[in-house]
Image: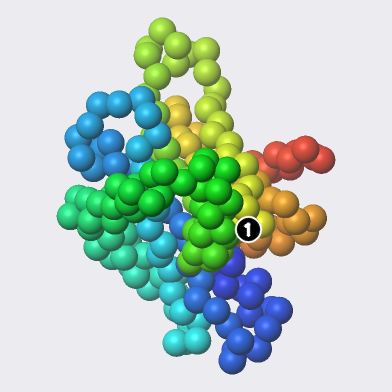
C-alpha cells in the first residue's frame, strides 16, 4: 500500500515537493495489555518512509515498516500515550467547560493533528476463527470502515477460512490507489478477485 501511495504522489509532483508517506495503523491495546473488554480500546501508530531519501524495494519497505511497528507498538510507549491523553481530562478548567465548546475544540485539534500525521488508515482484524458449526456456512467475512475527516482513502482487512478480504473505501472518484495496489498483488503471484459496486472481475 505504501508503494502505491508513493507512486501516485511521484506521478503528481516533483521530487522536491514529495511528502513522507505515512500509513496509520490502529494497535489493539486489549491484546497488548492482556485486557478482556468489548470496548474499542486502541491507539494508532504512523509508519512509512520519506521518498525524498531515495527509492526502496518492496522488501526494504516491508523491513522498515515491520521494525517501526515493533518499536512503536510496545506497552511502555502505548502507556505513555494513554497517560498523555488522560492528563488534559484532569484539568479543572477543561472539566468545567461546556460540552459544546469541548466538541468545537476537539474537532479543531483533530483537524490540525489527528489525521495530518498520515495519509491512509489500514485497520487489520487479522485471522478470525469461527466455531466449527458456523464455519461451514460462511464463505468469507468482510470488515468495512468509512472514510475519515481528511483521509480520502481507508482500508480494512480481515481473514477467515483461507480468504483475506481487503476493503478499500474512498471519497474520491478515481480508483488509482486500488488499481496500483491490487495490480502489485497480481505481480507478486497472489490470486486476486475484485468486486465493486460497479462490476466484478478476477
* Looking at the image, residue 73 lies above or below residue 191: below
**Residue drawn 43% across the image and 68% down it:** 48
- Residue 110, position as x, y percentages in the image: 52, 57
In terms of image quadrants, where is residue 160? top left
Q: Nearer the viewer, residue 19 or 62?
A: 19
Judging depth in this view, the residue of 12 and 127 nearest the camera is: 12
Visual colour scheme: rainbow
Q: Residue at x 65, y 88 (%)?
A: 14
What's the residue at 40%, 19% (across, down)?
130
**Looking at the picture, does residue 48 appear above or below residue 174?**
below
Examine the rendered structure and indicate whether residue 30 appears above or below residue 114.
above
The one of 49 and 196 positioned closer to us in this rendering: 49
Looking at this view, name the residue that lies furthest to the bottom. Answer: 16
Q: Relative to residue 201, is residue 32 drawn left or right?
A: left
x, y percent for residue 131: 37, 14
**Is residue 188 among what the camera can see?**
no
Q: How many marks?
A: 1
Q: Secondary structure at mark 1?
A: loop
Q: Is residue 7 left or right of residue 127?
A: right
Q: Give left or right: position of 99 versus 68.
A: right
Identify the residue under disc 1: 150
Q: Is residue 144 visible?
A: yes
Classify 10 Å Cα crowding around label 1: few (below 14), some (14-19), many (20 and above). some
Give the residue drawn at x 44%, y 27%.
Answer: 161
List the single residue furthest toward the top. Answer: 133
Q: Quadrant of residue 67?
A: bottom left
| Residue 74 rendering spot, x and y as whole percentages | 22, 54
User: Residue 193 sits in which quadrant?
Assistant: top right
Q: Quadrant of the C terminus?
A: top right
Amino acid at each position: 500500500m505504501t508503494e502505491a501511495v508513493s507512486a501516485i504522489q511521484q506521478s503528481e509532483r516533483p521530487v522536491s515537493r514529495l511528502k513522507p508517506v505515512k500509513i496509520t495503523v490502529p494497535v489493539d491495546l486489549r491484546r497488548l495489555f492482556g485486557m478482556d473488554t468489548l470496548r474499542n480500546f486502541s491507539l494508532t501508530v504512523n509508519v512509512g518512509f520519506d521518498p525524498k531519501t531515495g527509492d526502496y524495494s518492496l522488501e526494504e519497505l516491508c523491513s522498515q515498516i515491520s521494525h517501526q511497528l515493533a518499536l512503536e507498538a510496545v506497552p511502555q510507549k502505548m502507556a505513555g500515550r494513554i497517560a498523555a491523553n488522560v492528563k488534559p481530562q484532569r484539568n479543572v478548567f477543561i472539566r468545567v467547560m461546556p460540552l459544546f465548546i469541548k466538541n468545537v475544540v476537539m474537532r479543531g485539534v483533530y483537524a490540525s493533528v489527528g489525521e495530518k500525521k498520515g495519509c491512509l488508515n489500514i485497520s487489520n482484524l487479522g485471522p478470525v476463527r469461527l466455531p466449527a458449526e458456523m464455519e461451514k456456512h460462511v464463505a468469507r467475512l468482510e470488515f468495512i470502515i468509512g472514510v475519515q475527516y481528511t483521509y480520502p482513502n481507508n482500508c480494512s482487512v480481515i481473514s477467515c477460512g483461507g480468504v483475506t478480504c481487503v476493503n478499500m473505501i474512498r471519497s474520491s472518484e478515481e480508483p488509482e490507489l486500488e488499481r496500483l495496489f491490487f495490480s502489485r498483488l497480481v505481480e507478486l503471484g497472489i490470486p486476486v478477485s475484485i468486486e465493486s459496486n460497479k462490476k466484478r472481475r478476477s
